[in-house]
Image: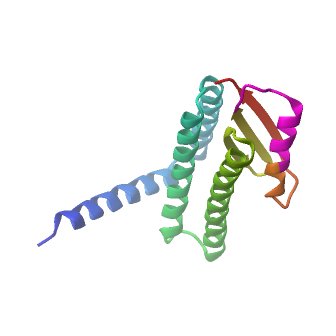
Amino acid sequence: MIKKQNLWLLTLFSLILILGVYYVTMPNEVLEKINIKTEELKEDKVEEESSLTSLRVSKETTRKEKIDSLESSLASDNLTSSEKNNTYELLKYLNEIQGIEEKLEKKIKKELGLDCYIKIDNSDANAICISKEHDKTLANKIMRLVQQTQKNKLNITVKFQKN
């Protein structure tokens, strides 16, 4: 007899497998159009959103979707060992970046007393901070804190929002 928990696990696994197969078999033109549209929507959303929590939630959901798709592709038998290695390295990189962003947000909160949102993409880092002051010295301090955590040079942008 199958338990409810096992049935749910089987159902969810089947759904993920079906979606993974659907995603892999989609034509490249459709995927490119979808990616372009979602990037445009994400840019519009970032400009419209004002609260840091909504920015954090949207970043977490997009990153979670990426991680889930990478994990499902890693579990598939269609990839070669080098492709699986690259996928694993990308997963590891995403987890490291997520940890660095969280540490930076806590460090800025502790040292400067500012609530910040940090997002790192390859060699770019964006910091959005809530502060009454909007001066260059504060931005410079934030930029130095962000750069101290990375070995490579980053293009850092700092934006301020009022309470």
Q: Would residue 32 be found to the left or right of residue 8 on screen? A: right
Q: Nearer the viewer, residue 87 or 119?
A: 119
Chief SS of the magenta region = helix
When the figure is inspected, residue 147 is found, relative to residue 4, above or below; the finding is above
Report the front residue among 143 and 113.
113
Quadrant of the rendered structure where residue 137 is?
top right
Determine if the magenta segment contains residue 140: yes
Q: Name the residue: 70% across, 41% down.
A: 113
Answer yes or no: is residue 107 visible. yes
Residue at the location (74% across, 42% down)?
112
Picture residue at 73% right of the left edge, 39% below the top: 127
* Most foreground residue, 16 or 55: 55
Say left or right for 83 vs 127: left
Q: Is residue 38 left or right of residue 161?
A: left
Q: Position of residue 21 (x, y in %)?
A: 44, 57
Q: Position of residue 161 (x, y in %)?
A: 70, 26
Query: In the image, is residue 14 above or below residue 106?
Result: below
Residue 103 on image: x %, y %: 67, 55
**Numbered range of the magenta stretch:** 130-144
**What is the tally of numbered marks visible in this picture?**
0
Tell me the quadrant of the picture where the C terminus can be found. top right
Q: Is residue 158 magenta?
A: no
From this view, report whether residue 123 is shown above or below residue 32: below
